[in-house]
Amino acid sequence: MRGWHPDCYSVRPMSPELDPVRVTATWRVAPAEARATSAALHVLMMATRLEPGCERCVFSTDMADDVVVRYVEDWSSESELQRHIQSDRFAQLAELLEHATDAPAVEFSLPTGRRGLEYAERVRAVGQL
């Protein structure tokens, strides 16, 4: 097939050594807030990409009755992710999530398994001690 890279079809085994440490957030915003949310995420994404340990940071939007936003960060290690969670940048992401029209879905994929938003709350709490 033209336009497809062979690696797109490769299947690799799931293992903590190969899978990235990942943050995935999905939420909905009102159409009137879509432009401001996208602009804020673009600035946040570009700054996050410059952080040590950030391997990838992307976001996308899907326009419907509400706008669905999907934001993904991949980190080289859990310790780099934890450092990021304690940063002002992560606080900015949390602020954007507060404008969701319904409860956001946030998942942390870690070598030890998957966690929800309570993981970030715990990491931030430990960092403030």
Image (cartoon, rainbow, N blue to C red):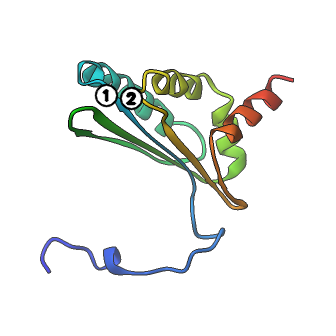
Q: Read off the residue under disc 1.
A: 38
Q: Quadrant of residue 116?
A: top right
Q: Read off the residue under disc 2.
A: 41
Q: SS at mark 1?
A: helix
The N terminus lies in quadrant:
bottom left
Q: Do the residues bearing badges 2 and 1 touch, measured as CB atoms within 8 Å?
A: yes
Query: Which is nearer the eye, 19 or 48?
Result: 19
Alpha-carbon span between mark 2 and mark 1: 5 Å
- Looking at the rendered structure, the kind of residue marked 1 is Ser
Q: Is residue 74 left or right of residue 5?
A: right
Looking at the image, residue 103 lies above or below residue 30: below
Q: Could you say where residue 58 lies in the image, as x and y percent from the top left?
A: 39, 44
Residue at 46 percent of width and 24 percent of height: 96
Q: Is residue 115 left or right of residue 128?
A: left
Q: Could you say where residue 72 lies in the image, as x and y percent from the top left?
A: 45, 46
- Looking at the rendered structure, the kind of residue marked 2 is Leu
In the picture, the disc for residue 15 is none
Query: Which is nearer the eye, 52 or 121?
Result: 121
Residue at 65 percent of width and 69 percent of height: 17
Q: Could you say where residue 56 lies in the image, as x and y percent from the top left?
A: 46, 49
Q: Quadrant of residue 3?
A: bottom left
Query: Which is nearer the eye, 70 or 76?
Result: 70
The C terminus lies in quadrant:
top right
Query: Which is nearer the eye, 12 or 67?
Result: 67
